[in-house]
Every structure is written in C-alpha cells, then in structure tokens.
C-alpha cells in the first residue's frame, strides 16, 4: 500500500469502532464531504446511526475486516484493541492511519513506556511485573504504587492501588502481566491533543486540565490554569512524541504535573480523546475534523481556540436526569451519544460550556455552571 496518498473529499473513510468517538469522527468526515464506512460489532450503536454504511462484525473477525477494508479507501480507528493479526490484514489492503505500529505500542503499557523512555520524555518510575516473583522487587519503587493491567485498561479499570509493603504482600491472583508505577503526587492532570499530518505538519491544541471521578474523566478545563511556560512545555512534549512515532492523525497525551514541578507522561491514545471534546465548541476546527484531515492528507490549520471552555462528561443515569435542566442552561452545548441504556459509569454524552477567552470561571463558580448532580 502506498502510504503518502491524499484522499480527496468524495472518498470513503473507514472507521473501526462503533462508539461515541466513531460517531463524532463520522460526523466530522461527512462535514468534509467524505463517505463513512464503519466496522462495528454493535448495531444499532452510537456510530452506526451516523455512518453511510456499516460492516457488522467483531474487530478480530478476518472476514469482517476483509469486507470492511474492501469498502473504504483509507482506514482509521477509534477502538484501540484490534488484534495484531487484524491490523496486519488491514494494512495489506488499505493505508491505516495512524499506522498499526503506533497502535501496537499504545495497546500495551509496557511497550508504551519502553518507547516513551526511548523518546526521552519523563515518566513515573515503573517496572514490568510478569508474575508473583516480580512483586518483591517493587519495594524499591516506593509506596504508594499502582498496578495496572498491561492491556485493555480504560476509565481506571484493571488498576490496583497498593499503599504499603503489607498490602503488597497480601496481593493474590493478580491478572499478570502488569505494570507497576509509583503513585505520583500530582498538582494537576494535564493533556494535550496533538495532530500530525501526512506532510509532517504538527499542530497542538491548547494544554488542558482534567479532573477524574471514580477513575473516569469528569471535567476538562480549557485552557489549563497554569503558567504559559508549562503549557508550552506540555505541547512540546506531545509534539515530540508525535514526531518520533511518525503519527498520522490525532493523539491524546495524558500527563501529570507533579508536585515537584516536573511533567510526566501518563499514557498516549492515538485517536480522538475524551479530553479533546471541548474543541467541538471552542475551536473552529475541532479534534475530530483535525483527525479526518490528517488521515485523508488534507492541510491542517493552526489548532486555534476562539473561546475558553469547560467540558463536563455525562455519566450514567444520574447525569442523564440532568439533561432537561442542561438544555435550559444558557451557554451550554449538549452532545448526546445516542446510547439507549444509561448504565452506571457509562459515558452517555458531554456538555461544553464556553466563555470568552480569558473568562474561565474560578473554582467556586465551576460548581454552579451546571445543575447539580
Ligand atoms: P486508563 O487507561 O484507565 O485511563 P490511566 O493510566 O490513565 O488509565 O489511569 C487512570 C487515572 O488513574 C489517571 O487519570 C490518574 O488519575 C490515576 N493514575 C494513574 N496512574 C497514576 C500514577 N502513577 N500516579 C497517580 N495517579 C495515577
Ligand atoms: Mg487515562
């Protein structure tokens, strides 16, 4: 497959993944005049509702992948856990952007940390834990620490927090392989959405600040309320990773601003990311359009923010109950994902509240932005 081809509007963009990121990517592709063909195991689902056509099948089913590839010109994904075999099959048929190699790195926390160390960005001290025999050595990392499954973790799932040597010794039946990380005493969690085009152009959206609740992203503040130098340092770090990986497409880079002032990379996600949803209402060209432009080879405009924004995730039935009040709130832009069942912990949608640049409210006012939970 040639890897430098530009696909003009009118071509078909293939998106692997039937969730909300696929949905919003599909809408962005349609806005630019592309047809969208989707691979989704779920029908109907958030993304199939807005795609021109769909291959229904599992992400690792060779027949489904083959059918899917035959119906599109260029392939991208929102679902990160496509098997190595599935990826190789796709890459034989069509350009896959970002390249499968980047996906393989982001799928596995050990591969990811190894590659990020080679690139030379700061990371929380970590060790691979392949079995019970590796646990004793973790004392040298220091406590508290956190164990994470190397694969399939999201929204804080597959994580075990360990406060001291006693808790470490009491651990049993862990789902190896794991990675152990020292718990970082952080000032803030930051993230940067970075996009890199076919010609190597790199654009970074503003550095933002993320707050989690029960391991799930709750609120994003754009821009992060930090010194401009630190915000730029975060963007430079994201750009350096994108360049080193030869990224084509968008990537979320999650970071800790540690209490000692250093910036540490937590994880990368080579796809649109929840912490970039604020761009939908605060930027002329949002993260999804940037991603589509990158994977099709169109030019990337500067990632300019015209407004400040606060993004709130709507999670589970309790947040869905707030929707009527949110609809009646001035300045709040509602995005629902079309999921029919509001299970606890499930991301149902998000709300962006925008402000003139420089007018992001202070801590107290944040709480009263939206109707209370
Ligand atoms: P996921 O893939 O589930 O997003 P993360 O590695 O991003 O996994 O962890 C989820 C959250 O857990 C982070 O956003 C952060 O709040 C917390 N966390 C993870 N690793 C650490 C760490 N080393 N130190 C402190 N907090 C952490
Ligand atoms: Mg994360």
Image (spheres, rainbow, N blue to C red):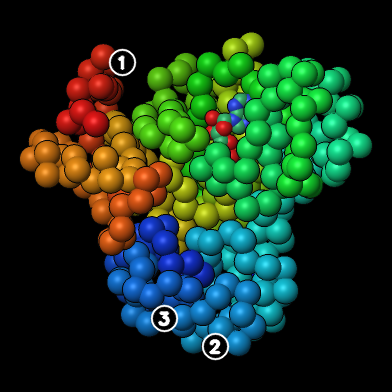
Look at the image and tell me whether residue 276 can be seen: no
Query: In this orientation, which residue lies closer to the viewer: 81 or 291?
Result: 81
Determine whether the residue tagged by mark 3 lies in a helix, strand or loop: strand
Nearest the eye: 311 or 192:
311
Q: Earlier in the sequence, mark 3 or mark 1?
A: 3
Asked whether, in this view, residue 287 is left or right of residue 230, the answer is left
Residue 338 picture location, percent across and down: 28, 61
Q: CA distance from mark 3 to mark 2?
A: 10 Å
Height in image: 15 above or below 261?
below
Instruction: For marks 3 and 1, give the CA distance.
Output: 44 Å
Indicate which disc residue 54 carries: 3
**Coordinates of residue 133 in the picture (x, y in percent):** 91, 37
> Quadrant of the rendered structure where residue 262 is?
top right
Q: The C terminus is located in which quarter?
A: top left
Residue at the image position 30 percent from the left and 32 percent from the top:
310
Q: Is residue 39 visible?
A: yes
Instruction: Provide the secondary structure element on which disc 2 rests.
Output: helix
Please tell me how crowded label 1 is: few (under 14), some (14-19), or many (20+) other residues with Cα within 10 Å: few
Q: Earlier in the sequence, mark 3 or mark 2?
A: 3
Residue that mark 2 sits on: 67
From this view, report whether residue 335 is shown above or below residue 166: below
From this view, report whether residue 56 is shown above or below residue 236: below
State the residue position of label 1: 363
- Tag 2–tag 1 contact (CB < 8 Å): no
Q: Secondary structure at mark 1?
A: helix
Left or right of 217 on screen, residue 280: left
């Amino acid at each position: 497959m040639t890897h430098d081809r530009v696909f003009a509007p009118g071509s078909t963009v293939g998106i692997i993944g039937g969730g909300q990121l696929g949905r919003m990517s599909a809408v962005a592709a349609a806005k630019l005049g592309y047809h969208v063909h989707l691979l989704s195991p779920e029908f109907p689902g958030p993304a199939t509702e807005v795609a021109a056509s769909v291959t229904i099948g599992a992400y690792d089913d060779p027949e489904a992948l083959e059918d899917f590839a035959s119906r599109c010109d260029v392939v991208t994904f929102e679902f990160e856990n496509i098997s190595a075999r599935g990826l190789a099959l796709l890459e034989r048929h069509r350009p896959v952007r970002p390249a499968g190699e980047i996906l393989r790195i982001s799928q596995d926390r050990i591969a990811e940390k190894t590659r990020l160390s080679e690139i030379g960005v700061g990371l929380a001290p970590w060790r691979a834990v392949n079995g019970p025999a590796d646990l004793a050595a973790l004392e040298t990392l220091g406590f508290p620490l956190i164990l994470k499954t190397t694969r399939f973790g999201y929204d804080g799932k597959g994580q075990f927090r360990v406060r001291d040597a006693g808790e470490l010794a009491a651990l049993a039946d862990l789902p190896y392989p794991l990675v152990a990380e020292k718990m970082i005493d952080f000032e803030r969690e930051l993230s940067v959405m970075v996009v890199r085009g076919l010609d190597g152009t790199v654009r970074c959206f503003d550095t933002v600040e993320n707050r989690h609740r029960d391991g799930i992203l709750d609120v994003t503040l754009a821009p992060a309320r930090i010194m401009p130098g630190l915000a730029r340092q975060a963007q430079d770090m994201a750009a350096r990773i994108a360049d080193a990986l030869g990224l084509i497409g968008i990537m979320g880079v999650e970071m800790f601003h540690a209490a000692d002032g250093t910036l540490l990379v937590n994880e990368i996600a080579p796809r649109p990311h929840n912490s970039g949803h604020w761009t939908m209402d605060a930027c002329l060209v949002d993260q999804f359009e940037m991603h589509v432009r990158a994977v099709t080879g169109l030019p990337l405009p500067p990632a300019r923010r015209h407004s400040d924004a606060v993004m709130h995730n709507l999670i589970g039935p309790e947040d869905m109950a707030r929707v009527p009040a949110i609809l009646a709130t001035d300045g709040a832009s509602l995005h629902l994902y079309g999921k029919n069942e509001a299970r606890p912990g499930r991301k149902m949608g998000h709300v962006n509240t925008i402000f003139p640049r420089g007018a992001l409210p202070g801590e107290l006012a944040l709480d009263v932005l939206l109707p209370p939970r």
